[in-house]
Amino acid sequence: MNKPQPPSGDNALALAVLNSVQNPVILVDPAGHVAFANWEAESFFGASAAQLARHDIATLIPFGSPLLALIDQVRERKAPVNEYRVDLSSPRLGQEKLVDLYVAPVVGEPGSVVVVFQERSMADKIDRQLTHRAAARSVTGLASMLAHEIKNPLSGIRGAAQLLETSVESEDRALTRLICDETDRIVSLVDRMEVFSDERPVDRQPINIHSVLDHVKAVAQAGFGRHIRFSENYDPSLPPVHANRDQLVQVFLNLVKNAAEAIGDQADGEIMLTTAYRPGIRLSVAGSREKISLPLEFCVIDNGPGVPADLLPDLFDPFITTKTNGSGLGLALVAKIIGAHGGIVECDSQARRTVFRVLMPMHKEESALEQGAAHRMTGKAQ
C-alpha cells in the first residue's frame, strides 16, 4: 500500500506524529469526506489515504452506525465525546470490529472532526490479564494458608492411618491405604499451590527464546508429544527476552503439554511454535508511571478441537479446567509467571486453531535493536 509523502515543516512533524500513533486516526471534513487517515487507519479500513479521501465517511462504516451521530453531536456542541464498545463489523471492515471511539472538534477548522478508534480486542485482553493477575494473587494468599493449616493435620492423619494398617484385619487395610493415598494426593495439590506464594524477585537475564522453545520441543517429542508433528516459524533476528530461563521453560512446557492433550489421538495433530516482533503494545505497571513495551510475541498454536467459548474469559483463573482429573492450576501459574516478567498471555481459540500468545519485554540493552526492528517494520509498512 503506497503511503502519501507528508509535506515539509511543521505539517511534516504533525503527520509523522499521527503516523506513529498505534490507533487508527482519521480527519473528517465538513462535507463528511476523510481528509486524512494515518497508517493505522489505512490498515483498519483496508484502503490508502488517497482512496479514503474519495469516500464519504458514511460509505465506509455500517449503515446507521452510532459514529455518524457522534460526529454530528461534536459539530453541534463543539466538544469532544467518547463512546465505548461500538460495533463496526461489516463485510468491508471484517467481523468482530468492536471499538472505543474518541471524536473531537478540530481547533480552527469549523465542521472538521478527528476520530480515534481503539480496537477492543487488545483492550479487553489487557483488562482480562489484569484480572488474571488479581486471581493469581488471591491464590497466593490461599496457598500460604493451606500450607500451614492443612499440611500439618494431613501428616497426622496419614501417620495414624499407617499405624492402623499394622493392627487391622487384611480386608480393612484397603481403607487405611485409601486414607494414605488421598492424603498424599491433597498434599501434592497443596505443594503445587505453594508455588504461587513464592514472591521473591525473578532473576532475569537476556535469554534466546528460540533455545528455550527448541528445548521444550525436544522434551515434548521425547515424551507426551511423540505422536504430534511440530513446526516452527521463527524470526531469526529477534532480540533477547528479559526473563528467567527456567521459568520460561516451565511456561512453554505447560502450554505445549496442554496443546498435546487437547489434540489427543488426532491423526493429523500439529503444534506450531512462532516468534515475532510486534511493536506498539505497551502496558502500564502498577505503582509506576512507566509503560513497559511488549514487542516480543511468542505463540503456541495447535489444531485441536479448541477451548469451549464459555471457558475462554476465565481460562487463566485458578481451578478452571477442561480435564477430567485436572486441578486448573497450570494456566494460572503461567499467567503468574508471565505477569511477574511484566508480560501478558492470552488465548484465541476456534475449532482447529487455538493460539496461546505471550507478549513480553525485551532486554533493555537491546534498545538499539528495538529501534532497528521498528525501523524495518515501518519500512515494510511503506
Image (cartoon, rainbow, N blue to C red):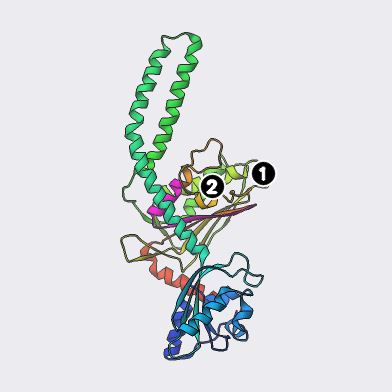
* Residue type of the residue flagged with mark 1: Gln
The residue indicated by pointer 1 is 266
Quarter of the image with the N terminus in it = bottom right
Corner quadrant of residue 31: bottom right
Image position of 100 (left or right of 302): left
Residue 291's spot in the image, x, y percent?
37, 66
Q: Is residue 66 above or below residue 110?
A: above
Of residues 225 and 118, the one nearer the viewer is 118
In front of the other: 49 or 12: 49
Answer with the quarter of the image where residue 198 lies.
top left
The answer to whether residue 21 of the structure is visible from this angle is: no
Is residue 343 highlighted in magenta?
Answer: yes
The single residue placed furthest to the right in the displayed view is: 267
The part of the chain drawn in magenta is 332-352
Q: Is residue 191 placed above or below 138 in the rendered structure?
A: above
Circle 1 SS class: loop
Q: Residue at 34% of width from left, 66% of height from top?
A: 290
On the image, the x and y values in percent for residue 190 come to 40, 35
Name the amino acid type tagged 2: Val
Across and down, in percent, residue 319 comes to: 47, 42
- Mark 1 near mark 2, Cβ–Cβ under 8 Å? no
- Mark 2 = which residue? 256
Crowding near the residue tagged with mark 2, few <14, some 14–19, many ≥20 C-alpha atoms within 10 Å: many
The residue located at (45%, 44%) in the rendering is: 318
Residue 367, can we see it?
yes
